[in-house]
Image: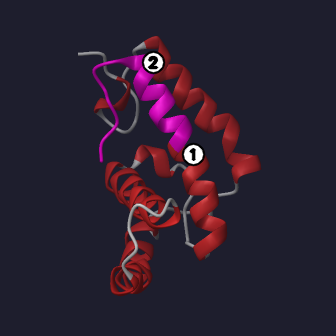
């Protein structure tokens, strides 16, 4: 699950959607999301994959109790991937920094997460 880096508008929208997903996942599963997670490609991919996995169960697309249990068991492994960073993620505090990240994507400039803001 990677952002569509070839189109800056789609990339920005993808990250906006992921922001909402991350806020929901953080609350629902008390995940230890760190500030500036959007700059860490591994965390971005892990959070996007988890959000897609949860969405399939929530929407009813998947109705597989053993699979849902596997998701819940895997939360610990996902949480381990998210522990990189200094400060906990607080949406209210971190939103301005995230908005700067989105502006860089929209402007088509390089971002700290490597290719996320690139238009090439």
Look at mark 1 in the image and give the residue it sits on: 19
Quadrant where the C terminus is found in the figure: top left
Position of 33 with respect to 56 (left or right) is right
Using the rendered view, name the quadrant where residue 34 is placed. bottom right
Q: Pinpoint residue 72: horizontal percent, then vertical percent.
A: 44, 82
Position of 27 with respect to 101 (left or right) is right
Q: Pinpoint residue 57: horizontal percent, then vertical percent.
A: 45, 67
User: How crowded is the residue under tag 2: few (<14 C-alpha within 10 Å), some, or many (20+)?
Assistant: some
Q: Magenta stretch: residue 4 in it?
A: yes
Q: Residue at x 50, y 29 (%)?
A: 13
Q: Pinpoint residue 19: horizontal percent, then vertical percent.
A: 57, 45
**Secondary structure found at label 2:** helix
49 or 61: nearer the eye?
A: 61
Q: Residue at x 63, y 56 (%)?
A: 23
The mark found on residue 9 in the picture is 2
**Looking at the image, can residue 14 be seen?**
yes
Q: Residue at x 67, y 68 (%)?
A: 27
66 or 39: nearer the eye?
A: 66
**Magenta-tinted stretch:** 1-17
**Secondary structure found at label 1:** helix
65 or 89: nearer the eye?
A: 65
Position of 51 with respect to 89 (left or right) is left
User: How crowded is the residue under tag 1: few (<14 C-alpha within 10 Å), some, or many (20+)?
Assistant: many
């Amino acid at each position: 699950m990677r952002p569509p880096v070839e189109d800056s508008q789609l990339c920005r929208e993808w990250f906006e959607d992921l922001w909402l997903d991350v806020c929901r996942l953080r609350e629902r599963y008390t995940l230890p999301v760190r500030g500036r997670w959007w700059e860490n490609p591994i965390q971005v991919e892990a959070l996007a994959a988890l959000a897609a996995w949860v969405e399939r169960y929530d929407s009813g697309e998947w109705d597989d109790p053993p699979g849902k249990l596997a998701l819940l068991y895997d939360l610990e492994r996902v949480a381990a991937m998210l522990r990189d960073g200094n400060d906990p993620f607080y949406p209210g505090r971190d939103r301005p920094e995230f908005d700067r990240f989105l502006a860089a994507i929209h402007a088509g400039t390089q971002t700290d997460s490597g290719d996320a803001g690139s238009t090439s």
